[in-house]
Image (tube, rainbow, N blue to C red):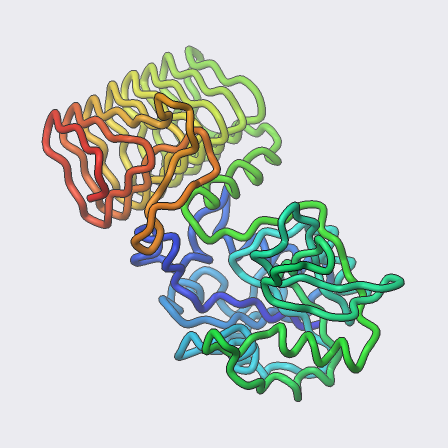
Amino acid sequence: MKAVVLAAGQGTRIRPLSDSVPKPMLPVADRPLVAHTIDAAIDAGADEIVLVVGYEAETVGEYFGSEYRGVPVSYAVQTEQAGTADAVNTARDHIEGPFAVLNGDNLYDPAAVARLFDQCPAVCAIEVDDPRNYGVLSTDAGSVTGIVEKPDDPPTNLANAGAYAFPAEAREWLEVPESDRGEHEITDVVATVIDEFDVTPVTLERWLDVGRPWELLEANEWKIGNLERRIDGDVSEDATLEGDIVVEDGATVKPGVVIEGPALIRSGATIGPNAYVRGATLVESGAKIGHAAEVKNSVLSRGTSVSHLSYVGDSVLGRDVNFGAGTNVANLRHDDADIEFTVKGERVSTGRRKFGVVAGDGAKTGINSSLSPGLKLDTGATTRPGETVERDR
């Protein structure tokens, strides 16, 4: 079974985090998002990975190379983002025999991916309360009988989860006409397979489509929450570490620090002195949390610094961000309503009662800056000392 993993998109809804890093390469616990998908495919028995790349393809290639975990990796370049079927068709020269297709920006229940491979042809689905915003599967007697995109009256509550195991014949069905959205949709390929084969629905116990910044935060909550305690770095005897915490070799935890797991402190990161880290927090390589700073349930990307006397909660900070001393992030509205965030120019609900700031690479705050809930700081944005920032910058 070859696994075709789709990783060509930039991720416009997750900006500014994807301004210079393709969305599938954003950090989720100890590896990029797409690596979790590839690991699930390899664990399920994939004997080759075919990565469909496009935006910042070099970043993907540098990480995975020509072999990953002993499994060959090849690449197909999608020059224009023309839909999922087009992406898979880009890889058709690499396909022979049965093949799987997985979205590189989705997190899957690994056991379900193994069942998907075993039951080929098959489609992964997830039970949802309101399937109207998804592709929806129809089933009968344990077989998939149809698939329809975003129906007003869904036939079931089984949403398409973007993972497929196709028979070899499907290679010849990848060239599909444009849909009403102007894209070549993989669901049209699925429909043909359903007409020709008995297709099994494989229900996922857990699944996450990571499309927006708070979903990247949720992805880290999931994967960091699965880590088992391991302390390999330089941890002061005067530090307190409670729960499932990983401190990698090369990380430094200084005196007076309190870390309440789950948390992942990566090699080259520095915490403290006297800092407080809690919640599902990721501190990437080269990131620093200064004296008496508190970071809660957040992602601090590579090279980012949260200076002394600062508070950062429920936030995602890109690479080389610098929060000046005394920067405070508000993550809760006074009326307790869900926090809203700007996605492609529109304010949308995050569905989260607590959500702080999303900062693009290289953003910087002046000392004693105050940042409102649901705020976006674009790549390279700055604030003035003592400023209260209430609108995206």
Identity of the residue furthest to the front in this view: 153
Q: Quadrant of residue 147?
A: bottom right
Q: Nearer the viewer, residue 239 or 82?
A: 82
> Which residue is found at the position 35% from the left and 57% from the top?
21
> Which residue is found at the position 36% from the left and 19% from the top?
254
Q: Quadrant of residue 327?
A: top left
Residue 60 coordinates in the image, percent (x, y)? 44, 64
Residue 273 coordinates in the image, percent (x, y)? 32, 17
> Which residue is found at the position 42% from the left and 38% from the top?
267
Above or below: residue 23 compared with residue 323:
below
Which quadrant is the C terminus positioned in? Answer: top left
- In the rendered structure, the answer to whether residue 91 lies left or right of residue 136 reads left
Identity of the residue furthest to the right in this view: 141
- In the rendered structure, the answer to whether residue 288 lies left or right of residue 34 reads left
Above or below: residue 351 compared with residue 93:
above
Residue 80 coordinates in the image, percent (x, y)? 40, 78
Above or below: residue 218 compared with residue 367:
below
Residue 37 coordinates in the image, percent (x, y)? 59, 57
Which quadrant is the N terminus positioned in? Answer: bottom right
